[in-house]
Amino acid sequence: MQRELLPVKEVTFDIKKVFEDKRIDRYLASRLPDYSRTFIQKLIKEGAVLVNGRAVKSSYDIQKGDFISVRVPVLEESKIVPEDIPLDIVYEDDYLMLINKPYDMVVHPAGGHPSGTLVNALAFHCQNLSQVNGPLKAGIVHRLDRDTSGVMLVIKSDVVHSHIAMQFEKRHVKKEYLAVVEGEIMFDSDEIHLPIGRHRVDRQKMAVRRDNGKDAISVYEVVERFRGYTLVRIMPKTGRTHQIRVHMRSIGHPVVADFMYSNHEACYLSDLLDKERECGEAPIIERQALHAHRIEFFHPIQNKKMEFQVDMPEDISRLVRTLKDVRPNKNSNN
């Protein structure tokens, strides 16, 4: 396999707290955001992941006191291997594309993740992609987190890339997300204006940083309230890393099943029914319930405003349907 020919590095984790029902593949996927969960599972199967010096299965539940070591490949910086990965193409012309990105897909190779990314798929599909951000980010003018699904803009031309990037910089690109969050939000709409920077201790995470954080603004509107949960529409005015996830946590309403910012990696029916979890129970959703629903921008070649949206994927839709059934809010007018 090509991965075996690449240099590797070792990453370690010292588990110092108790997790509830935390599979090692889910834990590592959350701690190594540049690697897909599928890729992590392959590493585990190949014996590249050791717990206390011993190989384990992907279903292993990590325990307090465990010492985990992971050997991951280091990507050769200049090489992108085209891969025949299916793409859900919303729109395409000679200059740009709109993709409906699935969750558990990394946008571009990074941190030693050489394959399975959106850029690998784009390299197979397209003869030309913009190179403004280098070969590892060919065509990428903005990004979505690995476990965030939804509409994403891809650029083929360097000239068009520069035009679109300027629209992002001037905040002319309008984006709209849908999210299910924990708790019932008090206001029907509000603006969150809090600076975001790297977490002081956990370098994989972001946090509200009033000392040296970058300006970040998110506007939200309540779509529907449930008992203990809320479906919201969120319009970020800036594009900071993990912005929506950090902002919603900052007001006490983290995104459902967002392990990094809510400490829950999945949501189960038993959770919604306030019952003990049944053995073997399948989760309703096992990634953050966040979806890039809509994007609006100006096409510099066609000289017109363009707007695209994609519906919520099945896992978030299933969560909303279940909340309607088991946790309706009788006092809500939505």
Image (cartoon, rainbow, N blue to C red):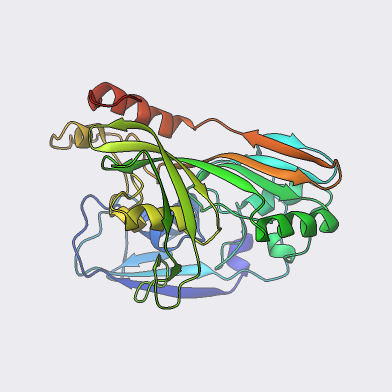
Residue 221 occupies which quadrant of the picture?
top left
| Left or right: 293 in relation to 327 | right
Residue at 56% x, 58% y: name it.
239
Residue at 57% x, 62% y: name it.
113
Query: Could you tell me residue 258's position as x and y percent?
Result: 36, 50
Q: Which quadrant: the N terminus? A: bottom right
On screen, 214 above or below 189?
Answer: below
Residue at 35% x, 66% y: name it.
50
Residue 73 occupies which quadrant of the picture?
bottom right
On screen, 210 above or below 150?
Answer: below
Query: Could you tell me residue 162's position as x and y percent?
Result: 78, 60
Instruction: Tell which of 258 and 329 is nearer to you.
Output: 329
Residue at 69% x, 63% y: name it.
136
Instruction: Tell which of 233 and 119 is nearer to you.
Output: 233
Instruction: Tell which of 107 and 241 is nearer to you.
Output: 241
On screen, 332 above or below 285?
Answer: above
